[in-house]
Image (tube, helix red, strand yellow):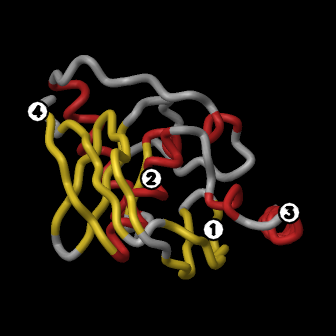
Amino acid sequence: MSDRTIRIYPDPVLREPTKEIERFDDNFKSFLEEMESLMYEYDGVGLAAPQVGESLKVAVIAYEGKLHVLINPRIVDYDGRQVDQEGCLSFPGIFEDVARPASVVVEAQDENGEPYSIEAEGFLARAMCHEIDHLNGKLMIDHLSPMKREMVKKKLQKRKKEDL
């Protein structure tokens, strides 16, 4: 059990630039395990380091029984367009239609620092784009119209008041 919690918008860490990972030591691997546990604990599909308060280029995604560890990832190619409902642990209870590429090619490193490339389409492409956005300080609401963005912010403020 971790003492970390999911950072909720508008926590400033969600907008901070992230640092590349250079050391793949035991402390880092423990952090990866903690991220994976938190993702499952909060019923998430993916989780990026800024969402747990760390400005690091790290994300994890669980899809179809496989854990994808994205360290220092970047999208090197994309194609097509898909629009679908998207949620985010940093925006609890909020689901909005977001346009994303239909397919992507991502280059990253694994937990041992080994480089790899993955082609993803559909839901996995969406999840990878979403998590990589987090690593660049970009959030789901940045893909919404200004009016929709304000509506989401008001919903979150209302929920926060209800929780007090």
Q: Say which amino acid is labelled 4.
A: Glu
Res 114 visible: yes
Name which quarter of the figure residue 120 lies in. Answer: bottom left
Sequence-wise, which precedes: disc 4 or disc 1? 1
- Of tags 4 and 1, the one toward the viewer is 4
Q: What numbered label is drawn on residue 146? A: 3
Question: Alpha-carbon distance for marks 3 and 4?
Answer: 40 Å
Residue position marked by numbered label 1 in the rendering: 92
Q: How crowded is mark 4: few (under 14 residues within 10 Å), some or many (20 or more)?
A: few
Q: Do the residues labelled 2 and 1 touch (CB within 8 Å)?
A: no
Judged from the image, the secondary structure of the residue bearing numbered disc 4 is loop
User: Residue 131, labelled with which disc?
Assistant: 2
Write the residue at 16% across / 39% down: 110
The kind of residue tagged 1 is: Pro
The image position of residue 92, as x and y in percent, is: 63, 68
Check disc 3 and give the amino acid type.
Answer: Pro
Query: On residue 114, which mark appears?
Result: 4
Can the viewer see residue 44? no
Q: State the separation of the CA atoms marked 3 and 1.
A: 20 Å
